Amino acid sequence: MEIRPILSALMRSKVSMILIGLQVALTLAIVCNALFIIGQRLDRMQRPSGMNETDTFWLGSYGFGANYDAKAQQQADLVALRSMPGVVAATSTNSVPMSGGGWGEGLSLQPGQKNSTAQTTLYITGTQGLDAFGFKLVEGRDFRPEEFTFVKFGDQPHPQSIIVSKALADKLFPDSSAIGKQVYSEDKPTTIVGVIERAQQPWMDSDSIEYSTLLPMYMPYGNSTRYLVRAEPGRRDEVMKAVEQKLVEANPSRIVGKVKSIADIRRDAYAEDRAMAIILGAVIIALLAITALGIVGMASFWVAQRTKQIGTRRALGATKADILRYFQTENFIITTLGLIAGGVLAYAFSLWLMHAYQSPRLPWYYVPVGFIALWLLGQLAVLGPAMRASRVPPAVATRNV
Amino acid sequence: MFAYYLQLGLRSLKRNPILTALMVAGIALGIAASMTTLTVLHLMGSDPIPWKSDKLHYVQLDNWSPDEPARDDGSPPDQVTYQDAAALMKAAKADKQAAMFKLVLPVQPENKELKPFSSLIRATGSDFFGMFEPRFKYGATWNHDQDDAHERVVVLGNDINEKLFGGQDSTGRSVRLDGIDYRIVGVLDKWNLRSRYYDLTNGAFADPDEMFMPFTTAIDLKKRSSGNNSCWKSAGDGWDAYLTSDCVWLQMWVQLDSPQHLAQYKEFLDNYVNEQKKLGRFARPLNNRLLDVKEWMSDQKVVSRDMEVQTGLAFAFLAVCLVNTIGLLLAKFTRKSGEIGLRRALGASRREVFTQFLIESGVVGLTGGVIGLMLTGLGLLAVRALYTQYKTVAYLDWSMVATTIALAIAAALLAGLYPTWRACRVQPAAQLKV
């Protein structure tokens, strides 16, 4: 292959070569890091909450006036909800996974322990809690009806028994089953009676997102209560409307609101991650398009500039394929030089992101994959102009100007 | 001459429409990406109250557990307890002071056509309005005596006054919240806060407050704040235990009009905490902070990291677009070597050739800038759609429009400079030979 003439030709248009190389380098560095960030966000968005997210929704009831009896209303509402057609299970709860707001607490293995063993969230749920959430019991048992207590708002909850997520059980008791074991919160003991496969905390950025605890309790927050309802498959939207209507009719001196499906809660919880992925995706596409078009523009210019030489070469016996190969090789050389610089730049970008944002290191394989992608892009971009070059008739060489 | 060169430039651009479109599109996309992200970044972090942001200070006291700091970096908790807020309000050692918390109460409208709805209330002292300076449309704030008397008065925000009273002057009338009537003493004008910087703990871009009531009155309701509450040890049972607990759930701001006042207030806080230490509280070392508005916003990371990364990448993208434009202009001008040679041979000076081609680059830049500005508008629409909570910070203001145009022209001239310089170095003789 005639590399030498290509190189010497390139040396005569150094600036153009540097410009294309620089563009390829920056493109590689940006695309690798942006793709890596997109991948991280997509992974994050895939995290399971542990609950049934397709058939469930939650809503709030905010009573007002001096005569509002939150405790009685809560029980009446639960009875009403459970009797409605299409409802599989209904419970009261203070929070749900991904909602962003909830109650956190430290659990300890000993009373009087200085630093708690694990930070957990507390889901304060009524009966039918496991069914309504769709949490899967993997060990032990569900709460018994007699274990549910009523806690006055403002008082500290001290349940006799709790159910914990598997991750929390493993953290507290790594070597043995957690069932029947005592743990302490605020120095008051409680017994683990059940373990569920998975239950995420409400906070998406929590360090201990898998550590959750269910308490068998009714505790209206002042005059307000939240209910979690699970509908029969496919009937969620219809049940949502009916439930809102029913609660308003049952007691008009309250506001029934914030009716929201858990699917919508997930969408909102990950809105920023999705936005980041979409924006970076758009930048990648625009960047690749600009770079490809830049190569097309440059190559076209070179072809036009060298029409005469091409004609001469053709007249001297070079085949169409030779001309095609010439331009493809030239592009390959420039792209490769750019990619080498870009590889270094990609890791530099990654280092900056690691330093400034504690983001993880760019995995090594992103850069080689980027090499292949940009080589292909370069070859595709140069194909059109190179084909045009190969069609230059040898007769051009004999013409003046 | 300028008009003539402009004409020449336009004609030359028309001759290669695809190449021209490519250059303009490159600049427009690069500008749009960088300006969209820069606008959001700029508005997110911009000083919400520039004329006095260095006088407003956020009070932090370290009442946390002796065993572990409130935050991993050792800084004090981001809110204060009721007992400390009440003591600081009572001492009134600052030029102005306001403790506050967020409360949600149901509104029962007089107008029976309106259904009851819940509304976001800020419970705070009368100094709040003098410190954060919202404009009043009707009436005025309640006064200190009314604070002390726990009076049932409220100031309405503009939106809720529209909703309840059709935007009329409602001062003197009353509004019923959770079964209790409150007299309206004032109505605010539209308050376009970019970020709710006085309560960053509960979200800089959360929904705006709809109503304001005296802190003392709100405490009488014995209702817990709907904002963040943190305790390092159990509060105990009941409301009174909660008020005397070490749970933090209030924001405390002070206005200190001079550096002397700031120094004096710091000393006062240290003395206060030392007194409390004698009573067995504040087991941690002295660690009070009085950050001003901008310091507090940066401490609480109001500017999102995602936006910073996006802005960085967008500017790298702009760099690629510029490199692209340099290459294309270079190609274009080189092809015109013959024409340049002819002009030079006919007596045009290098300077004239330089001006001519720089104007051509300028036209590309200006067109790219104008299209880029329109795309920036679209980009901000997209940001508003993707990040619903950023609706207050994703719009163009005049300074950003001017920056966009300036950036576009600067970018195009920068991109045009080298190719133009090369163009005017063309040797007439070399080009005129056949």
Image (cartoon, coloured by chain):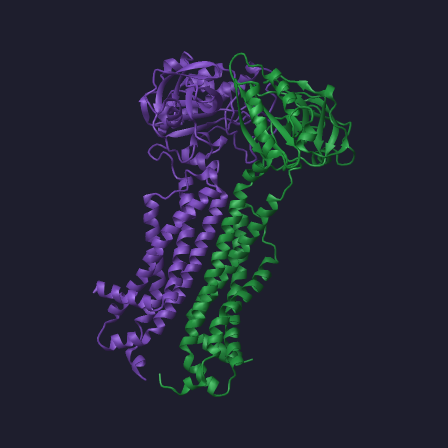
Chain colours: A green, B purple
Task: Please tell me which residue lies in front, A280 or B12.
Answer: B12
Q: Considering the image in quadrants, where does the N terminus of chain B appear?
A: bottom left
Does residue A125 appear anywhere in the picture?
Answer: no
* Residue appearing at x 52%, y 58% in the figure: A29
* Residue appearing at x 43%, y 75% in the figure: A303
Task: Please tell me which residue lies in front, A217 or B16.
Answer: B16
Q: Is residue A211 above or below residue A344?
A: above
Question: Percent from the top left, x then y, of residue A64?
Answer: 51, 17
Question: Percent from the top left, x then y, of residue A342?
Answer: 52, 61
Which quadrant of the figure has residue B257?
top left
Task: Please tell me which residue lies in front, A152 or B430.
Answer: A152
Which quadrant of the figure has residue A368?
bottom right
Left or right? Give the position of A107 relative to B338.
Answer: right
Left or right? Give the position of A94 relative to B129.
Answer: right
Question: Percent from the top left, x then y, of residue B8?
Answer: 26, 67
Q: Is residue A78 above or below residue B356?
A: above
Left or right? Give the position of A65 relative to B338.
Answer: right
Does residue A265 appear anywhere in the picture?
Answer: yes
Q: Considering the image in quadrants, where does the C terminus of chain B appear?
A: bottom left
* Residue appearing at x 66%, y 33% in the figure: A232
* Image mark count: 0
Question: Percent from the top left, x then y, of residue A361?
Answer: 59, 51
